Image (cartoon, grey):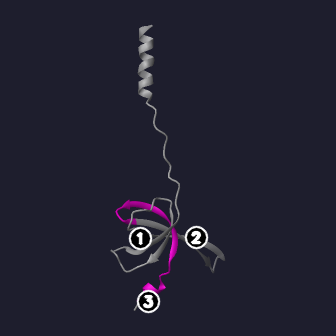
Amino acid sequence: MYSKAEEAMKPVVGMVVSNKMQKSVVVAVDRLFHHKLYNRYIKRTSKFMAHDEKNECNIGDRVRLDPSRPLSKRKNWVVAEILKKARIYVPPPAVSHHADASNKTENTVAS
């Protein structure tokens, strides 16, 4: 029914690092493992491409990925749910300094 590779794939949780593609996102998944020789925990990051059907994910979102059949050469994951939405920074509207500068020069010339 399932291949051994597909059975070994478990749902993972990660952070969206890129959403520049249509219906696809790149998710960074961190994992900790114990190094036997150095007796320390080491953090490793893996990047997975995942299918985002509704284009809902933004950079910084925390998402859960479920394994699926191969959707393309590198996409074997599907975004199951968005666990936490990231805050989106909206810059304040830019004030035109050029108009202020032209008024000052007109005032100095008129004087």
> SS for tag 1?
strand
Could you say where residue 99 lies in the image, as x and y percent from the top left?
41, 25
Q: At which x and y percent is residue 45?
A: 52, 69
Rendered-image quadrant of the N terminus? bottom left
Question: Badge 3 is on which residue?
Answer: 4
Q: To which residue does mark 1 refer?
A: 50
Position of 47 relative to 2 (above/below): above
Mark 3 to mark 1 CA distance (whole Å) = 20 Å
The residue lying toward the viewer, choosing from 55 and 49, is 55
- Give the residues drawn in magenta, as a range: 2-24
Disc 3 secondary structure class: helix
Q: Residue at x 50, y 59 (%)?
A: 60
How far apart are the two marked residues, 2 and 3, measured between alpha carbons?
A: 26 Å
Q: Position of residue 109 (x, y in %)?
A: 41, 11
Say if 75 sits above or below 16 in the image.
below
* Classed neighbour count for the residue bearing mark 1: other residues with Cα under 10 Å, few (<14), some (14–19), many (≥20): many
Closer to the N terminus: mark 2 or mark 3? 3
Type of the residue with mark 2: Lys
Residue 90 against residue 80 in the figure, above or below: above
Task: From the image, tell me which residue sits under label 2.
Answer: 43
